[in-house]
Image: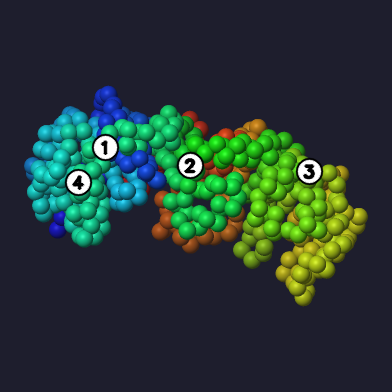
C-alpha cells in the first residue's frame, strides 16, 4: 500500500526546511497563481524552522530520531536520497527558502500548493527515487510540464521554475486538471496574481504565515446578507481580507486588515473608523481582576446613527415616528462601553456586568414608559426600582439596569447590582493585559489563567485528562487572548506565560514532550 503523499511531503519538507541554508528568491513561480484567486496562504518555512529552535542541540537530536523513524517506512534508495537532501538541501530541487503558497480560484477550482523549483533535474531525480513510495505510475511528460499521479486524486506537476501539487478529488476531473495546469504554468506576471494590488500588499506584510481571503468566497450564499450594510453599488466582492501570523517571544500575533480598490468602500471604511474613538478604560475599576472575559469599545453614538441612517434597509426597519426614538437611543452613548463576564458555574446563569458612558437616562425612561409596546410575554415585566433604576423580570432571569452619574449599567447578578458604582480591589486595572488596551478603539480579552481556575474547568479537565492531556498543557501555557482594533487593523494576539522564549519554540517543545522525543 502506498504511503500518503501529504504525509511524506510534509515530513520531507520539514526536514529540508530545518536543514536548509539561505538562497535568493524570484517571483516567477508565483505567476502560476491565477489572478482571480479568492483564498491564498503563504508559508515561509525557513523562519518558522529557525524560530522553532532547529539549531538547538535537543532539536537536532529529535530530528535525527525522526529521520531514523522514516527509515523503517522507506526503501533503501529513498532513504539514502532523503539523507543526501538533509546534507545538501539544494539536492531536493526545491527552494525551501522561498514561500510555499496554497490557493483556490474560480478559474482553477482545485486546492493547490505552489513551490519554487531551483533545479528541475534534481527534483526529477528525487521523485524518480521516491516514486515507489508514493505512486503506482511513473513520471509522465505533458504539455509544458512533467507530472506524477498520486493515489488517483493528486497530481504533482513541475517544470523548470514551479512545482504544483493539485488535489483533483475525482477521476473525471483528471484531464480538465491537466489542461488547467498547462494554462496556469504559461501565465505571466501581467495575467497572474502578481498584478493584484492585494497580493502586492500581502508581500509587504511581516510574518511567517500570510494570507488573503475574499469574504464573498468564504461566506458563499450568506455573503448577500452582509451586502446591505455596505454602500450602494458595492458588495462583499469588493473586499479582500489580508492577514499575517508571526511567532514572537511570549506571543503569537495575527494582524488583519481590509483591502479594497473601490473608492466608495474606502470612504465607507474611513467613516466607520470615525464612528469610534480610543477606549479610555474608565470602567476597569468596577470589574474584578478575576474577570473571565472583557469587551470594551469607544463609540460616537450620534455619528454612528447618522451613518446607519444612510442605509436604505436600516431606514426601512423603523417608521418615521420611531426614527426620533432610535436616534435618541444611539446618540445617548458616548465614549466607553465595557462588558465583562464575571463568573461561570455549572448550574447557574453566567454573571455579566456592563457599563457605558451616556448623556442621560432618558432612553431607559422611555423604554420603561412604553414597556406595553415591547411584546413582553406572560411572566415578564419591567419594574421601576428607583429614579433611573429598573429591573427586567422573567421566571428564570432578572436583569438590573439603570443610570447613575451618567453611567449606564446592567447586570444579571443581584450582588453585582448592589455594588454598582463601587471600586473593587483588586480590579481589572491591575491585570497584565491592561497595558494592551490603551489607544485601542475596540478590544476583547479572554483571561485564560482565570478560565483554567474555574471549578467547572477543573472538573472538565479531570474527566478528560487522559484523552486531552496535550491540549490541557497548551491551555495552561496561555496567559490571555486579546482581540483588538485600532481603526486600520485588527490584531489577534495569544499571550503566553513564558515571555522570554519564542512561542513557536515553546509549542515545539510541547509537541516533542508528548511525542516522546
Q: Residues within 10 Å of mark 2 (few under 14, many from 20)?
A: some
- Residue nearest the observer in this picture, 162 or 69: 162
Rounded to the nearest angstrom, the CA distance separating label 1 from label 4 is 18 Å
User: Could you tell me if the residues under marks 3 and 4 are in contact, i.e. CB atoms within 8 Å?
Assistant: no
Residue at image mark 2:
241
Check contact, mark 3 vs mark 1: CB within 8 A: no
Secondary structure beneath disc 2? strand
Q: What is the crowding at mark 1: few (fewer than 14 residues within 10 Å), some, or many (at least 20)? A: some
The residue beneath circle 3 is 357
The nearer-to-camera label among 3 and 1 is 1
The Cα–Cα distance between marks 3 and 2, rounded to whole angstroms, is: 32 Å
For marks 1 and 4, the one nearer the N-term is: 4
Name which residue lies at 79% across and 63% down: 392
Query: Which quarter of the rendering shows the C terminus?
Result: top left
What is the secondary structure assignment of the residue under circle 3? strand
The residue under label 1 is: 187
Residue 257's spot in the image, x, y percent? 52, 38
Residue 373 pos. (x, y %): 80, 67
Is 33 displayed left or right of 329 in the figure? left
In whole angstroms, how far apart are the C-alphas of marks 3 and 1?
57 Å
Residue shown at the point (39%, 45%) measured from the top left: 39
Tell me whether the residue at label 1 lies in contact with that at label 2, contact meaning CB atoms closer than 8 angstroms. no
Q: Nearer the viewer, residue 281 or 345?
A: 281
Q: Earlier in the sequence, mark 1 or mark 2?
A: 1
Name the residue carrying label 4: 156
Amino acid at each position: 500500500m502506498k504511503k500518503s503523499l501529504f504525509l511524506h511531503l510534509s515530513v520531507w519538507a520539514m526536514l529540508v526546511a530545518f536543514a536548509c541554508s539561505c538562497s535568493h528568491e524570484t517571483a516567477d513561480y508565483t505567476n502560476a497563481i491565477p489572478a482571480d484567486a479568492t483564498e491564498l496562504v503563504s508559508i515561509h518555512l525557513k523562519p518558522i524552522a529557525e524560530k522553532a529552535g532547529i539549531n538547538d542541540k535537543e532539536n537536532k537530536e529529535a530530528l535525527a530520531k525522526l529521520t531514523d523513524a522514516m527509515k523503517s517506512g522507506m526503501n533503501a534508495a529513498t532513504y539514502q536520497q532523503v539523507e543526501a537532501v538533509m546534507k545538501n538541501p539544494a539536492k531536493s530541487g526545491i527552494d525551501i527558502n522561498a514561500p510555499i503558497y496554497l490557493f483556490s480560484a474560480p478559474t482553477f477550482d482545485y486546492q493547490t500548493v505552489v513551490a519554487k523549483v531551483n533545479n528541475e533535474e534534481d527534483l526529477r531525480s528525487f521523485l524518480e527515487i521516491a516514486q515507489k513510495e508514493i505512486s503506482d505510475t511513473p513520471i509522465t511528460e505533458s504539455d509544458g510540464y512533467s507530472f506524477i499521479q498520486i493515489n488517483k486524486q493528486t497530481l504533482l506537476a513541475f517544470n523548470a521554475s514551479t512545482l504544483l501539487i493539485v488535489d483533483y478529488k475525482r477521476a473525471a476531473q483528471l484531464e480538465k486538471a491537466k489542461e488547467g495546469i498547462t494554462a496556469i504554468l504559461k501565465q505571466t506576471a501581467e495575467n497572474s496574481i502578481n498584478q493584484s494590488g492585494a497580493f502586492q500588499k500581502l508581500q509587504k506584510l511581516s510574518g511567517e504565515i500570510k494570507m488573503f481571503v475574499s469574504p464573498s468566497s468564504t461566506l458563499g450564499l450568506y455573503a448577500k446578507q452582509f451586502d446591505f450594510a455596505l454602500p450602494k453599488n458595492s458588495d462583499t466582492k469588493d473586499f479582500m481580507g489580508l492577514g499575517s501570523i508571526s511567532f514572537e517571544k511570549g506571543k503569537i500575533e495575527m494582524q488583519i486588515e481590509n483591502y479594497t480598490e473601490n473608492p466608495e468602500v474606502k470612504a465607507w471604511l474611513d467613516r466607520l473608523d470615525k464612528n469610534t474613538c480610543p477606549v479610555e478604560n474608565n470602567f476597569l475599576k468596577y470589574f474584578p481582576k478575576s474577570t473571565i472575559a472583557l469587551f470594551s469599545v469607544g463609540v460616537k453614538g450620534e455619528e454612528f446613527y447618522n451613518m446607519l441612517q444612510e442605509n436604505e434597509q436600516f431606514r426601512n426597519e423603523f417608521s418615521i415616528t420611531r426614527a426620533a426614538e432610535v436616534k435618541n437611543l444611539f446618540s445617548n452613548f458616548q465614549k466607553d462601553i465595557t462588558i465583562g463576564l464575571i463568573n461561570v458555574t455549572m448550574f447557574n446563569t453566567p454573571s455579566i456586568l456592563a457599563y457605558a458612558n451616556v448623556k442621560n437616562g432618558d432612553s431607559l425612561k422611555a423604554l420603561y414608559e412604553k414597556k406595553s409596546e415591547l411584546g413582553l410575554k406572560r411572566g415578564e415585566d419591567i419594574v421601576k426600582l428607583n429614579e433611573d433604576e429598573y429591573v427586567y423580570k422573567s421566571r428564570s432571569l432578572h436583569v438590573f439596569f439603570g443610570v447613575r452619574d451618567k453611567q449606564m449599567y446592567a447586570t444579571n447578578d443581584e450582588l453585582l447590582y448592589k455594588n454598582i458604582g463601587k471600586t473593587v480591589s483588586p480590579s481589572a486595572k491591575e491585570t497584565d493585559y491592561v497595558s494592551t488596551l490603551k489607544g485601542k478603539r475596540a478590544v476583547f480579552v479572554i483571561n485564560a489563567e482565570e478560565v483554567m481556575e474555574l471549578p467547572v474547568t477543573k472538573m472538565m479537565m479531570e474527566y478528560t485528562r487522559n484523552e486531552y492531556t496535550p491540549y490541557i498543557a497548551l491551555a495552561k501555557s496561555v496567559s490571555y487572548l486579546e482581540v483588538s482594533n485600532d481603526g486600520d487593523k485588527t490584531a489577534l494576539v495569544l499571550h503566553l506565560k513564558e515571555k522570554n522564549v519564542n512561542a513557536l519554540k515553546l509549542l515545539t517543545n510541547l509537541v516533542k514532550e508528548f511525542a516522546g522525543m
